[in-house]
Amino acid sequence: MPEKIRVIVNEDRCYLCGGCAGVCPTLAIEVHSSGWEFFQDKCISCRICINACPVGALSAEPLEVSE
Ligand code: SF4
Ligand code: SF4
């Protein structure tokens, strides 16, 4: 089973272009003028967003599954 991840944004790099939200197949990312938002329950850990970000602002950390 592929590892579940949490996607994290580096707010110092992200310029809110919306590219990651545009490529996410499950709409797990929303980008507004006010900021970047991630919805863990929608994410399927495909990492497409991480590869799509032109400035490398996204990274992944393993999602701890508790209980
Ligand atoms: S890893 Fe895949 S599903 Fe999760 S936020 Fe990125 S593009 Fe969307
Ligand atoms: S693609 Fe990168 S720079 Fe653009 S909104 Fe997403 S995280 Fe920010």
Image (cartoon, rainbow, N blue to C red):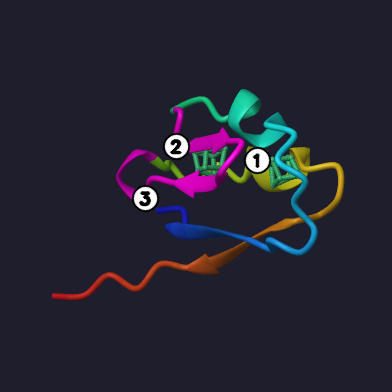
> How far is the residue under mark 1 from the one under mark 3?
13 Å
| Mark 3–mark 2 distance (CA, rounded to whole Å) | 7 Å
Q: What whole-number distance in Å separates the C-alpha atoms at marks 1 and 2?
A: 10 Å
Residue depicted at x 69% and y 48%:
50
Look at the numbered disc 3 and give the secondary structure of its residue: helix
Front-most of residues 63 and 53: 53
Res. 28 mark? 2
| Identity of the residue drawn at 27% across and 70% down | 65
Mark 3 lies on residue: 40
**Image: magenta residue range:** 27-42
Locate residue 13 relative to residue 45 in the image: left or right.
Answer: right
Cβ of mark 2 under 8 A from ligand 1: yes
Q: Amino acid at mark 1?
A: Cys
* Picture residue at 56% right of the left edge, 30% below the top: 24
- Magenta-drawn stretch contains 17: no
- Mark 1 CB near ligand 1 (8 Å cut): yes
Amino acid type at mark 3: Gln
Secondary element at tag 2: loop
Circles 3 and 2, Cβ within 8 Å, touching? The answer is yes
In the image, ligand 2 is in what quadrant? top right
* Label 3 packing within 10 angstroms: few (<14), some (14-19), many (20+): some
Q: Which residue is mark 1?
A: 49
